Amino acid sequence: MRSDQLTTDQVAAITARVWPMLEYLAQLEQRMHQRKFSAGDPLFALVTEARNGIQGLYAELGHLSPEPLAGKPVRQPKSIMPGNADDPLGRKPRK
């Protein structure tokens, strides 16, 4: 099987699971930055790498969907881009 053979329902199901992970990692990365973790810190680097990977997966899922996710463009979580709009799946970001 290939990723372009996933059904719309399968893409939606994966996306629904990936979004909370992305939001959590983005918030964790932001908290670590606010607490002045050094860029060379191994844990900070791993969190950043994990967030980048999950963000890439989320973006790829958006490309696989025949329509933009929930009719909205794929966006980064609010914690990455302050002031960003709602989750592309229609959920409000946690505050």
Image: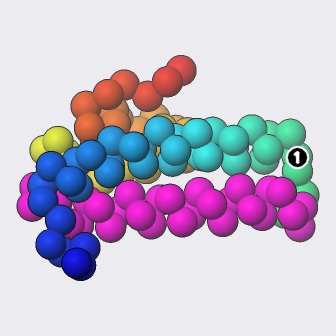
Which residue in the rendered view is the most extreme toward the front? 1
Which residue is drawn at the image coordinates 50% and 59% (left, top)?
54
Which residue is drawn at the image coordinates 32% and 51% (left, top)?
14
In the image, residue 65 sits, relative to residue 37, either above or below, namely: below
Residue type, mark 1 in image: Lys
Question: Dot 1: few (<14), some (14–19), or many (≥20) neighbours within 10 Å?
Answer: few
In the image, residue 54 sits, relative to residue 75, either above or below, namely: below
Q: According to the image, label 1 marks what residue?
A: 36
**Residue 24 on image: x %, y %:** 58, 39
Q: Picture quarter containing residue 59?
A: bottom left
* Magenta span contains residue 20: no
Which residue in the rendered view is the most extreme toward the left? 66
**Badge 1 element:** loop
| Residue 72 visible, this angle | yes
**Residue 2 on image: x %, y %:** 23, 78
Q: What secondary structure is the magenta-colored segment mainly?
A: helix
For the magenta stretch, what is the residue range?
40-67
* Residue nearer the viewer, 44 or 6: 6
User: Taking 57 as reference, is 15 left or right?
Assistant: left
| Residue 81 visible, this angle | no
User: Taking 91 as reference, is 26 left or right?
Assistant: right
